[in-house]
Every structure is written in C-alpha cells, then in structure tokens.
Image (tube, helix red, strand yellow):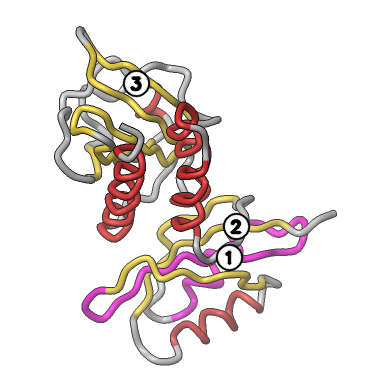
C-alpha cells in the first residue's frame, strides 16, 4: 500500500528549535515532513502548513497527539493531501491563465485555484438580476446553487461570514469557510470554499487578493 499524505496546519511558538522538536515528534509516529510553508507570523507565534507523509494504516489522530506533545504547539486542522508539491504555485497559475485561450482563462483559474490556495473548490460568480449567476466552477464545487450574495459588489479580498443567511444550508452543514476577491470588476468575484476549515488567515486572504489582481490585469489585456 502507498503512503498517505496529510496537510497539517499548526500554531507554534516562534522560537529557535521549535520546528525541529516538532519534526522529531512527528517522526516518532513514522511521519516524514515533505514540505513546509509559513502561512503567517505574528507576535511570538507562527502558523505553518506542513505536508507530512505517513505509513499505510496510520491514523491522523496520531499526528495530532504527537504534534501537541510539543510545548506551545496546537494543531488547527488536518486534511488528506493529494496536491502536487511545488514552490511557486501562484506564479505557475498566472502563467497558465495567461497562456490559455481567452474564453478558457477563468475556467483555468477555478480549476487550479484549489491546489494553489489549498481550498476545496473555487467558482467565479457575478451579480445578476434577481440573484447570482455562477459563470465557472471547479470540480468539487457545490451542487446546491448560491442564490444570494448580499456582500456584492466586493471592493477587496475578504473572508466571508460562513454562517450568514445568504449561505446555502448545505454549505453550512459541511462547515464551509468562504473567501472571495473581485476579478475584473467589483461585481464579479472568485469565491473559494474550504470544507471543514480552517478559517482563512489574513495572509491567505491577502494572497488571494494579489492573485485575483494579477489575473484581472491579464483579463483586461484582452479587452
């Protein structure tokens, strides 16, 4: 059987050696760290995303238990990970969008945004008479349609209230966290969903905004 990979998001004290101690503890349950990305740094803490590989049959709970044995470490979330490990995800996506045919560019964006931004699905929506129109959606996008988006027009990237009364009940039942950014105009946005959390960190929202801004520039070049 093949090894299994998980994406582990952890809060840890931002002090020398803390990551090394964490790596030792994860190694004690047979986990290998394949990649590390610093999501955010604050006053005395860091939020890191670790992709770890474990032997077949290992339970994800064992990773949580091992990690939280380290003083100052808290596991925020753990999810199966099947993405490609790469270090310049945003730049590669911008290149894919720019080289796609004009009519396919937003589909390329939503198809690849889940891998790049580590979310469950992506869609492009716009405000329409009487509600919302979904223009493009990735695989995994909810079958239950979005009929309201009271927050449109949107001026800048933001995490959205996942419990707002505009959120379909099926989305809420799956504990879907949401973020969006304007693309091309403030009435057209790319909407991201992350099923089961975690919440979008401010740095993740900022990255979404930068990415949407660059893609908007590419789209305007077609006009």
Q: Is residue 132 above or below residue 101?
A: above
Instruction: Residue under label 1, please give it.
Output: 63
Give how far apart the Cα atoms at labels 1 and 3 are: 32 Å
Q: Residues within 10 Å of mark 3 (few under 14, many from 20)?
A: few
Check whether the beta carbons of the residues at disc 1 and disc 3 lie within 8 A of each other: no
Image coordinates for residue 49, horizontal then vertical, percent:
46, 65
Residue at which label 3 appears: 169
Instruction: Please identify the quarter of the rendering in which residue 223 is found.
Output: top left
Tell me where the magenta segment starts and ends, as one range.
42-70
Q: Earlier in the sequence, mark 2 or mark 1?
A: 2
Q: Secondary structure at mark 3?
A: helix
Judging by the rendered image, the residue that carries numbered circle 2 is 6
Q: Secondary structure at mark 2?
A: strand
Q: CA distance from mark 2 to mark 3?
A: 28 Å
> Residue 107: which numbered mark, if any?
none
187 in relation to 91, above or below: above
């Amino acid at each position: 059987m093949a090894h299994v990979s998980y994406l582990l998001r952890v809060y840890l004290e931002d002090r020398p050696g803390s990551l090394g101690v964490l790596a030792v503890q994860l190694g004690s349950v047979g986990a290998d760290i394949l990649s590390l990305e610093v999501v955010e740094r604050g006053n005395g803490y860091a939020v890191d995303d670790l992709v770890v590989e474990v032997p077949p049959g290992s339970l994800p709970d064992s990773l949580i238990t091992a990690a939280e044995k380290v003083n100052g470490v808290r596991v925020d979330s753990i999810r199966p990970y099947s993405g490609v490990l790469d270090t310049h995800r945003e730049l590669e996506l911008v290149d894919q969008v720019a080289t796609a045919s004009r009519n396919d560019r937003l589909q390329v964006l939503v198809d690849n945004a889940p891998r790049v931004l580590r979310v469950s699905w992506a869609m492009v929506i716009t405000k329409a008479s009487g509600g919302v129109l979904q223009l493009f959606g990735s695989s995994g996008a909810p079958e239950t349609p979005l009929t309201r988006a009271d927050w449109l027009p949107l001026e800048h990237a933001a995490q959205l209230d996942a419990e707002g009364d505009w959120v379909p009940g099926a989305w809420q039942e799956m504990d879907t966290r949401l973020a969006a950014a304007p693309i091309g105009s403030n009435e057209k946005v790319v909407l991201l969903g992350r099923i089961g959390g975690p919440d979008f960190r401010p740095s993740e929202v900022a990255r979404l905004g930068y990415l949407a801004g660059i893609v908007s520039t590419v789209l305007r070049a077609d006009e």
